[in-house]
Amino acid sequence: MHKVKALIIAYFLTVLCGAMTSIGVSVHFATTGAGAGVVSGTLIASACASIFVAPFLAPVFDKFSIRTVAIGSIIGEIVVLVTLVLFLRPVVLIAGTLVSSALAGVSIPAIFSLTEKLAPDLAAAQVFSRLDTARLVGGFVGSAAGGVVVERVSLSGAFLAEIVVNLCVIVVLCVVGAPRVGDDEQCQGAGGDQRSFWRRLVEAPSLLLRHRQARVALQSIWVAIIFTSVYNVALVFFALNELHAGGLGYAVLGQGFVVGRIVGARLSSRVREGNAFVVLIVGGVVMGVAIAGVGVGRSVIVGVVCALVAGVCNAVQVGALRLLVVGAVDVRVRPKALSTMGSVNSSAMLVGYVCGAPLVQCVGGGCALVLSGVGTVVFTVLPVGVTWIAKKIRRT
């Protein structure tokens, strides 16, 4: 268990520093006159890397052990950070974000898979719950610290701190070793996989699409995430223009959702593979109702309560989906399946962010929140209903 705790702490520090430098980059370029183009460029580069580049890196899990993949990708991130310290230019930053986000698309699934293997006495839900809690708390603390670090130290100082943390993570990965003697090294990364790159690339997505519950879950969650992402766009306009709550009111509403996600990450440890699908669907329905409640309530207090509930459901949904994904494939394919899940989620978020602004302009922040909630409910349930009806028709 000491190895598992060390990995979770290392992951927490990695996320914390990553969030800190991300906020630091936005503050730095916003205050130095580079404009919104650089900030938007980094966000688009990050999303595109997760969607279009990371999937092409997933086949490395067939050639190398998950520990080797994790170490190699973190070394790559250190190289990116050193480059940014030496050449802090907008173009270099956007390119670095692209590379770093693509590497994270394999390093994070590798850390999740390795941690699960190192804790055979714990249920997968418990392991993932602890890692999710570390991720969310790290992101929360790192985001709060980012602006302070840039103002008091420098952006280069934030990059150097992240380099040190990544070096520590590599040390931890080297110390924890393989889950069992020969298990990780021989089952994965033996180097004898003679299949074509294309077959290795589509292996995880095809297995997930063939598994009925995983397929329906991914269909349901993809469209639901689009509507949930609209919530993130609409919330600021609703708080400022309709509630007239000011920056503080918006911060309180936003942090309500974040705190809810942290609580939900802890609760997700109680989800089991047998009830994960039901939890995913029920969680999506309750979250949609809560999101709509923010827009209907027209009150900061009601909004915070609803955002808290939505955040809890969101995190529990993520835990349930992850269990469905890893349960649908063989142990050998799990890192690639987790990488696929990350790409699916990122693509839906990108679509939601793109659609969010025009929707808010057309109907206003409050109506956009209501539509976001209703859409989340409808498209969470719709794929399940369609599958059930199709099944009944086939039987008749």
Image (tube, rainbow, N blue to C red):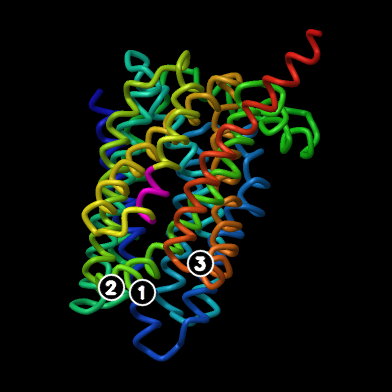
| Residue found 37% across the figure and 44% down from its top | 290
Left or right of 386, for residue 157: left
Where 220 falls versus 97 (above or below)?
above
Left or right of 31, for residue 381: right
Element on which disc 3 rests: helix
Element on which disc 1 rests: helix
| Residue found 33% across the figure and 17% down from its top | 122
Q: Where is residue 258 in the image (x, y as percent from the top left)?
A: 30, 50
| Residue found 42% across the figure and 77% down from its top | 86
Q: Position of residue 12 (x, y in %)?
A: 29, 45
- Categorize mark 1 by other alpha carbons within 10 Å: few (<14), some (14-19), many (20+): some
Q: Can residue 95 be seen in this view?
A: no
Q: Which mark is residue 395?
A: none
- The earlier-in-sequence mark between 3 and 1 is 3
- The earlier-in-sequence mark between 2 and 3 is 3
Element on which disc 2 rests: loop
Q: How far apart are marks 1 and 2 (CA)?
A: 5 Å
Foreground residue among 216 and 336: 216
The residue under label 3 is 43
| Residue found 50% across the figure and 30% down from its top | 321
The residue under label 1 is 241
Q: What residue type is labelled 1?
A: Asn
Q: Which amino acid does label 2 sit on?
A: His
Q: Where is residue 351 in the image (x, y as percent from the top left)?
A: 61, 57
The residue under label 2 is 244
Callout 1 touching callout 2 (CB < 8 Å): yes
Where 243 falls versus 226 (above or below)?
below
State which region is magenta. 290-295
Q: Which amino acid does label 3 sit on?
A: Leu
